[in-house]
Amino acid sequence: MMFGASEEYTGTESAVTLSTQAFDPNSVFEIRPGLQIPPEAAPMWDDETQAVVGYCVNRGGVFQYYDLDGNWVGIDELPLETPWLDPIDLIGVVGGLLRVFARGGIRLGPKMAQVVASKAAIRGVQATILARMRFAFTRLIGRQLQFTATTAKHMAQSERFVPVHILQLALKHGARKADGRALQGAFEYVIPMLRNGQGYTLKVVVREQDWTVLHFHYFR
Amino acid sequence: MAAVLPPMVEVSPRTERSLAHTSWDAESSTLLCEMDYPDPQPPRSPIDVALRIPVPRQRLTLNDLDLLVQDRRWVDLSLHGSPGDWVPTPLPPLVAVDAAWIVFQVEYDGNGIASFDLPWRLCWDPSHRTLGIVFAERPVARWVAVADTVLAAVDSTSRLGQLRLTGVELP
């Protein structure tokens, strides 16, 4: 060892609050925890929170809804005479309305998908279902994360940025192990993540004492 | 991850200045090397300027090394890890290294990301404050300077073999 522990990060440095975040309106980030959410589920993009807040599964006109934690939050059904949609891969939620983007929307991102949407079927979604989804989202971002100077800088770069609620989902559902540097209180969380439908592995190192993100990084 | 071999690169002469500033963030255990290009940038399309279309950037990950590139310019380089894992190795200064652009010949995905899971070795020479990142234990065909303190080695098959960062200050 060339360096003593005192020359590395000690886990006690002061954290900074995130002041700026890059935001890419054409990126849809997702973490699908566990096995609860069926793979064919369509993500539901909420214009109000600017995030995927839940999932919808259409099985013969019966719609099952899940929140971000994979909890089932409701079911509804369409009248038989209303063929709602073809196979879908992104749904927008505007107010209480669901808006179906054209197939391929997930790869284009919500803003571009709106532009090229060939069909914009709109239907109501039960207020309670949407409220449950938004509640799960709000609960996720309720715990404030701190950032180091470096991770704050990376959050300001759209190429490295990961939405805070996705980091929170990684901390909640990711595989946890002690940080490679064996520093007390620092843990690494690893979980599969999707960005615009593309699969990655997200790694987050956090100091649990004050929930400071020491490092995050996603790769294919 | 995409491949085991290091990425192919294209080397071309560089006349513009490229200055690098390296800093160590102990809290994040991350070495950050940011490049600056003080010379005037090539003009952009008036349409891109009018529509405020940003210049696309790509992100290349080589293990825990994260490199941001914009066209042929390297924007920054972020290396997460513990200096305790860096192997003490003499890395004497190289002489007569040509300034060059290094463009990665890799296929980025739709999000502009390419990843390589490479075997690597991190070497540290405290007397020269130099960090060497060795991706391939193959003979170096050519060393080039990507920036004043960032050197890259290319092997005979035009693959990136090593990176060398000088002027690395650790507390």
Image (spheres, coloured by chain):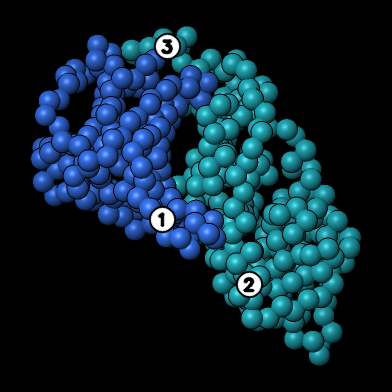
Q: Is residue A68 left or right of residue B92?
A: right
Amino acid at circle 2: Val
Is B167 located above or below residue A51 in the figure?
above
Give the residue pinned by disc 3. B171
Do tags 3 and 1 sit on the same chain? yes
Label 1 SS: loop
Amino acid at circle 1: Arg
Amino acid at circle 3: Pro
Label 3 SS: loop
Please give the chain letter of the residue carrying mark 1.
Answer: B
In the depicted view, which residue is nearer to us: B142 or A186? B142
Label 2 SS: helix
Image spot of residue B43 (x, y percent): 38, 53
Query: What color was chain A assigned in the picture?
Result: cyan
Quadrant of the image for the N terminus of chain A?
Answer: top left
Please give the chain letter of the residue carrying mark 2.
Answer: A
Please give the chain letter of the residue carrying mark 3.
Answer: B
Image-quadrant location for residue A139: top right
Give the residue pinned by disc 2. A115
Which of labels 3 and 2 is toward the front?
A: 2
Mark 1 Cα shell of 10 Å, populated few (<14), some (14-19), many (≥20): few
